Amino acid sequence: MRFLSLCFFLGLVLPLAALAGGVKGRVTDARTGEPLVGSVVFLKNTPHNSQAGLDGSFALLNVPEGDYELVGQMAGYAPFSLALHVTAASAAPVLLRLTDKNQELSEVTVQGRLDPEDDGAARRTEQIAPSVMNVVSAQAIQTSPDITVANVLQRVSGVTLERSTNGDGRYAILRGMDKRYNYTLVNGIKIPSPDPYNRYVPLDIFPADLLQRLEVTKALTPSMEGDAIGGVVNLVMKDAPAERQLTGQLGTGYGQLFFDRPFQGFDVRDINQQSPAERFGPAYQATPGDFPWLRFTKRPPAPNLLGNLTFGRRYGKDQRLGLLLAGSYQNTSRGSDGYFYDATIDISNQPQIKELRVQQYSTQQRRTGLNAKLDYRLRPGHTLRFYGLYLNLDELQTRAESDTTYKRPAQPDVDVLLRSRFQQQGIASGTLQGEHGWGRLLASWSAVYSRATNHVPDLAQQPLKLGLAGNRYQDAFRIWLDNTDQDQAAYLNLTYRLTEALDLSAGGLYRHKDRRNRYLSYGLRASGQLAVDERDIRSEPYTVFNPLGIYVGANNYTATEKIGAGYGQLRYATGAVEVLGGVRVEYTDQGYVTSLARTEPAYQGRQRYTDVLPSLHLRYALSKRQNLRGSYFASISRPSYFEITPYNNSGSVTDTYAEAGNPYLLHTQAHNLDVRYEFFGAGNDQVLAGAFYKHIRNPIEYGLVTLPSTAFTVYQPNNFGTATNYGFEWVGVKFWGSVGLSTNYTFTVSSITTDKKRVATADDARTLLPQTRPLQGQSKHVANASVLYKNVRNGLDLQLAYVYTGARIVQVGQFVGLDYWQRAQSQLDLSAEKRLTRAAARYGLTAYVKAQNLLNTPYQVDIRAPNPYAVNEFPYQTQPDRLAVINQTYQAYYLVGLRFNL
């Protein structure tokens, strides 16, 4: 019976199928010919629809014979339709060429307008950029496993990360050049840093979902600020779309670490936001009652919460006014478990374990981002824009620590410490810009005000010493730290088009920076008696050692910096050749005032210098899809504000030497060379292969220096002659249908020579020997490999991403050959998303999953010297040729959510 039924069914259906046909073809941009990935194609008044794949192709199958209207559409384009007759016979492929709605814009702007968040726009930006650049689109960010800008950067060739204690990336190292040698832009404008000591911006403060694209420029043009040797990170925020847009997402997640142990936290409302001196005046005598102790709790953390919302549209009959509002909120719980060994150096120059610290970090991060953009077209060729950005990162961190001091053959000395730290970092920036065209003359200007803040109120530690005869509370401290970094800047750029092939440009900037740093410390003296209640520090009768507080001179200063710059630039483009060159002149006036007495010679200081920075960039188009580039540029790197103040912290780095500032520190200068071959294939396929070389004068490194006319040796930033850095980069992306492979690899070699101490003995204090080593932060091998699956028609996107970071120096040691090396790391992440609605639906809903650190990759640091201890005598001391000093684990992190487009 079933067989007869099947035969009847096939006999009925097959004749009907024979009368059915299909429609196949491609959707492209009418102007550029590029495939429009994700564009929707449908037969009007029928259920037949499809979405263009990575090469722009589409297919509508099992369409009954007849006459239809075929429609192609995509955001930012005018719909395109044509009449066609479908038959059972194979028909020629159909080409749908959609026209952009913003044809009057420039080429670069058009590419952003076509689909500003698309991978195709990112590839086009790389192709027509005036210098060596890598671009990550919002689409790639959205489908990656990452939720912060810092973690996204690790997918870019030549970029490695310096991570925080919870395992998230915080600072970027470009081409082996430490974070001090790079700078960060937002919409092409430099922003101040909330870091209390340095210039560089912590990139984990930026939610990735606010970005339109992420640009990494590795060769500077004359119109760019010249203080970058490694490169420049530009965060291009979302812009007003050509059509109304309302998108958002809501997600939740959890960390594997807290399946295995509780989260230890405190109530932020119990934190004293102001010190006693701020509340009652500088003459106030603080009492123990002014320092209440926090109550800590242990419990599973609440699930993480992430969400964002973006609204944008254009207004007016001719769409003169554009508006974009975007907000992001992330509330996450992260943490780490770690073993930290403090090592001393014996007279044979061998490391010895002095103390083992076992630490558990529990960190709650509340990250808020707001982005507003407004543009108004006054008339053709004249546009005003306003950009507003607000970022805030609140970090509540608890560190539970057990310290064991080894004094052989005596019994180990054990301390238990509980530290609370609440840090508030913020960046606020407002930029007013104008673009104007008068025939051959183009002008653009910007007026910028931005402010970065860092506030750490009531940093506290609860110390308890364990002993055979009983336990005792130890002396404690309470610290308030604040800093602000404020910029006021103006930019002007003029371009005159002499001919169709030749442009002349000139411009400049002026920036006035004010930085203020305050550090106030109170000491609490313990009674020395046995603890009445070792579970509650409130039972200890502390007294205040310094009731007026101590404004630690090393951390209290006011700095100013005035930057004036001008440039001249020529761009010649004809046929396959483009030449861009010119010179930039930058004047720096950097000064500081400390909290020392005015009669002290080091009370204040000032540095002034001028740099002339030429550059030349060549691009030769081998074909429509191939470029050959060559670049030269000169650049600088300025010392941080804190480094040039004459501070002196005894024993701040080790127990052996004091750390000191250096008012005579010079800025770093570099000459840079780049060559690159580029191929841009269909869809996302591409090959980038290049090499670079950097010759660096007066690089800044920390090392041992004997102060002039003394026998006093300090650990301080200094200029150590010259350094070199060279290497090779590769980027390759290839798709076979829906399956793709994305790879990049960077090989880097650097060299610097610094003076170091030979052995740790007082009578040898002046014996310094040169050591040649790589630059701090430079890994010889850096690689990314991602296996991709992109089925545009079904709305399924999968990515398995692997990151390899080779061994590198993370801290320069004081003794010859005893630097601190981070071991090579391999990290594996996963992301997946599935469209839940039809491609042609007016509203879109997508489910996504992200998983980070699936291999539970540890952060491991060694001193490369023979290990004097037996293998496994201490935790993680597993290799005889090195002494492990750090082993920190973070576990995996999972996130699921829904993304919508209304």
Image: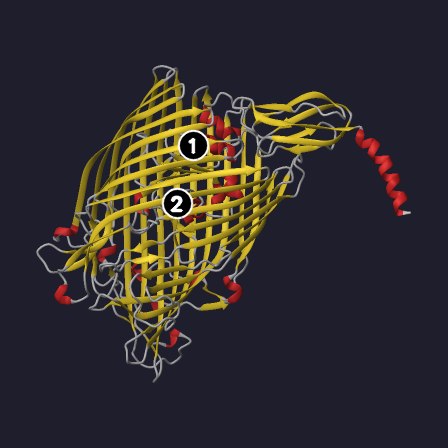
Q: CA distance from mark 2 to mark 1?
A: 19 Å
Q: Which mark is residue 678?
A: 1
Residue 120 location, x and y as percent?
A: 51, 32
Q: Residue at x 45, y 31 (%)?
A: 679
Amino acid bearing label 1: Glu
Residue 67 location, x and y as percent?
A: 76, 22
Amino acid bearing label 2: Val
Q: Quadrant of the C terminus?
A: top right
Residue 212 seen by the camera: no
Above or below for 64 versus 793: above
Q: Quadrant of the rendered structure where residue 134 is?
A: top left
The residue carrying mark 2 is 159
Residue 26 location, x and y as percent?
A: 61, 27
Q: Which is nearer the N-term, disc 2 or disc 1?
A: 2
Above or below for 860 versus 122: below
Decide if residue 671 is on the left or right side of residue 857.
Answer: left
Q: Nearer the viewer, residue 33 or 191?
A: 33
Q: Residues within 10 Å of mark 2 (few under 14, many from 20)?
A: many
Residue 340 seen by the camera: yes
